[in-house]
Image (cartoon, rainbow, N blue to C red):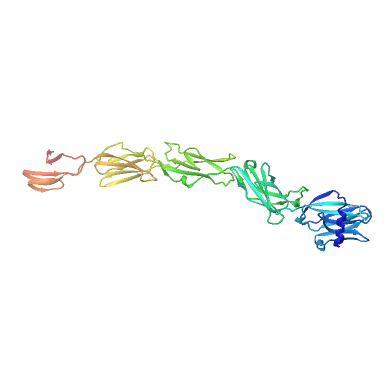
Amino acid sequence: MNQIFTHIVVVIKLIFIGTSLGEWVSIGQSHAFVCTYNVKSYPSFSWFIGADNIIFLCEDYGKLSCTPALDQLLEIYDANITLDSKNYTSVLTIKSVAMEHHNTTWYCYVTLASGLGSSSKYSLYVFAPPQTPSCLNAKLIDDVNIEEQCSTETIFPEAICLFYFKTNNTGAAKMNGGLITYQSEPSSTSGYIRTKCTYTISADKLGPGSHVFYVVMYPNITSNITEDMKRSSQYTNPVVIGYPNAVLAKDCQVNDYIKENQNRTCTCYDNSRIFLSTQVTWSNGSARDGQLEFLSKRPSKDNAMYTCSISNKLSLTKQITYQPNITYGPDSAVLYLPKLTFDQCDPNGANMSGTCSVSDSYPDPTVYVYVSNSPAMHQMKITNNDYRFSQVISESGIVYVLCRAVNTIYEEISSEIISSVTVKGPPEAPQISSVSGKTKSLTEGNKLQVTEGKTDIVCESKGGFPLYKNLTLVCGTHVQSNE
């Protein structure tokens, strides 16, 4: 048989070779080459792979038959020859197209008994649909451009990628207006190609919303693309494009009180988890990396309202205001006593009243009034809004009144003022402290029976304010006063 095939090769090399054809065939499919000759003169069909390697001989010598050059070829090919009323036809079928068949040439040489004949050339281009592609989650490559990268590990030849997106669970749409780049390299699977495609698009072309992406890949071939050639990836994680959300960090101490004239900080940041990077600015004060640095001052002296603005490259902005809760004062306590002199003999009594207030304080201070009313200091906590107080003074003399205002948050901050009032009061009833001379006896109270003669009587009176110096001695109808 080898001698027969060798002889045919020599003959065929002298025959004219006609026009060649090429087709795209998917790996794993069967494919047939058809060779027809319309002269009924018992032609023989010789099938070659390449120019010199014969694989089948099909002929009609009383019987239509095809013989392989090697029996192993029957695992790869089928060949037959048929005859109808007009033509001889020989068909060579590749049972399962493989990668090694790509860009391979087959020849069909038709030889007549006269030595005349024809030839046909067949080219086969192999493609392999992609393995299901996978996509990385989109990432931000600068302040505004979004990059989506997808790849397939096996495809042939290189892939064509079509990117799609869905916004807020609406229908899928093809992505336009971006830039797509390709990178191909040999796959770990021999003969195949690994293709990576990257799509870059500006966020403003996608617009606000929650976007998910996927890719459709198919081989880059000139044949008509059918659905069975395509493969789609899963959706990526959402990319959220929208307004930032400005929030204040714990160092801003929104609910806590801050002492005035303190160097403080307040950090503003975005917690919306939107995809675009943001920029933080403050309306006043000095800021660095989103952190405000300020000196705490009371609002009456400085504008203590700060505005944090967070914006992205799409000019989507959110703001939040921060007003430090600054505690200050009391600066100076004010004590007002409308009456400074009282008399216990007054029918209205020694009822002292007044106001104890402060000029400037936040929050409202705690105010105390202390009255040095012997024998003990009396303390009053004022809870009414007009800071009025009153106190009945039971002792005569100089009474000191202390007004003290205390910062409600920080008790070490306080202010106080002291004043005094005068309370007049009578002394106690005078008592005879000593008698010398001819006395008879003491009677009730301060009455004393005496006899004629010289009698020295000493009377004393305690208490009273101011000091009383006049004493009166009543003897019957005789009254004698001594100072």
Relative to 40, is 189 on the left or the right? left
Q: Position of residue 435 (x, y in %)?
A: 10, 46
Of residues 240 and 353, which is closer to you in this image?
Answer: 240
| Image quadrant in which you'd find residue 481 | top left
* Outermost left residue: 453
Answer whether residue 254 is visible to the viewer in this image.
Answer: no
Of residues 198 and 352, which is closer to you in this image?
Answer: 198
| Image quadrant in which you'd find residue 294 | top left
Say above or below: 317 vs 134: above
Say above or below: 354 vs 95: above
Q: Position of residue 483 (x, y in %)?
A: 13, 38
User: Quarter of the image containing the N terminus?
Assistant: bottom right
Answer whether residue 153 is visible to the viewer in this image.
Answer: yes
Of residues 466 and 176, which is closer to you in this image?
Answer: 176
- Who's the residue at 63% across and 41% down the image? 204
Of residues 476 and 36, which is closer to you in this image?
Answer: 36
Relative to 220, is 410 on the left or the right? left
The mark tally for this picture is 0
Relative to 48, is 399 on the left or the right? left
Q: Position of residue 41 (x, y in %)?
A: 94, 55
Q: Position of residue 335 (x, y in %)?
A: 32, 38
